[in-house]
Image (cartoon, rainbow, N blue to C red):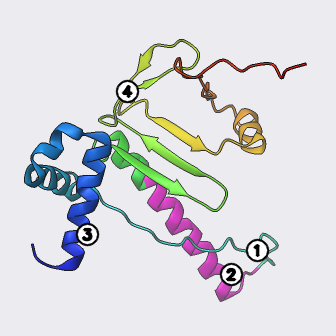
Amino acid sequence: VGSAPAASVREAVLEVCRDCLPKLCEMPDKAVRWMERIASCLVWYQVDGPPLPSSAYSSLPSPEERSAMRRVEEWDEAYRSLETMLRQGLLPTYAIASDRFTVVVCGEGAGPWTSSRTGSPQHPTKSSPCAVLFPSQDELRTMLQENHVPFEVALIQASAEAPAPQAPPP
C-alpha cells in the first residue's frame, strides 16, 4: 500500500493499537488486517429526516402537506423496520442521532451491560433490547415516565485510583 491516504490510515491503526492494544503493535501488518476486518463489519448511513408537517391542517390538506405527512410516515416505517430487524437478530444495534440527543438501541449480540440498580450483568436479547439515551435530560426522562417507559439512570462511579477530594485549607 503506497498511497498517502493508505499510509495515514495505517498510521492511525497503529496509533490505536499502541494506545489500546500494545501487544498487537509487535505485528503491524496483523494489526492493520485486524482493523480492516473490524471496519468491514461497520456500516454507517446518515440521512436527514423530513421536517415535521404543520399540525394545523385544514379539513383538506394541500398536496405539500400530504407529501410532508407521507415523508414522516415513511420515516416512521423505516424506524419500525430497524426495530423489527433488531428483534429478529438481523441487526445487533442501531443509533438514532438528533441535534439534542442520541439513542443507541442494542439487541442480541451487542454485548452485556451492568444494571445500575442491581449491579448484575444484563444481556440485551431479541425480545428484550436495551437502549442508551444520551445526554439524559430532565424533559426526556419526564416524557418517558409520563408514557410509562421503564428506564434506569446510569450511576457514575469514581475510579478507585482517583484521590479522594480534599477539603480546602482553612
- Secondary structure category for the residue under label 1: loop
Is 71 drawn above or below residue 137 in the view shown? below
- Which amino acid is tagged 3? Ser
Q: Earlier in the sequence, mark 1 or mark 4?
A: 1
Q: Earlier in the sequence, mark 4 or mark 2?
A: 2
Mark closer to the observer (1, 3): 3
> Are dots 4 and 2 in contact, CB under 8 Å?
no
Q: Earlier in the sequence, mark 2 or mark 3?
A: 3
The residue singled out by tag 1 in the image is 54
Q: Which residues are magenta?
A: 60-80
Mark closer to the observer (3, 4): 3
The C terminus sits in image quarter? top right
Tell me the residue at 32%/34% (across/down). Answer: 108
The residue singled out by tag 4 in the image is 112
Q: Residues within 10 Å of mark 3 (few under 14, many from 20)?
A: few
Q: Earlier in the sequence, mark 3 or mark 4?
A: 3
> Are dots 2 and 3 in contact, CB under 8 Å?
no
- Which amino acid is tagged 2? Glu
Marker disc for residue 8: 3
Q: CA distance from mark 4 to mark 2?
A: 44 Å
Please tell me in which quadrant of the rendered image residue 33 appears.
bottom left
Tell me the residue at 25%/39% (across/down). Answer: 21
Q: Nearer the viewer, residue 62 or 144?
A: 144
Q: Nearer the viewer, residue 105 or 6?
A: 6
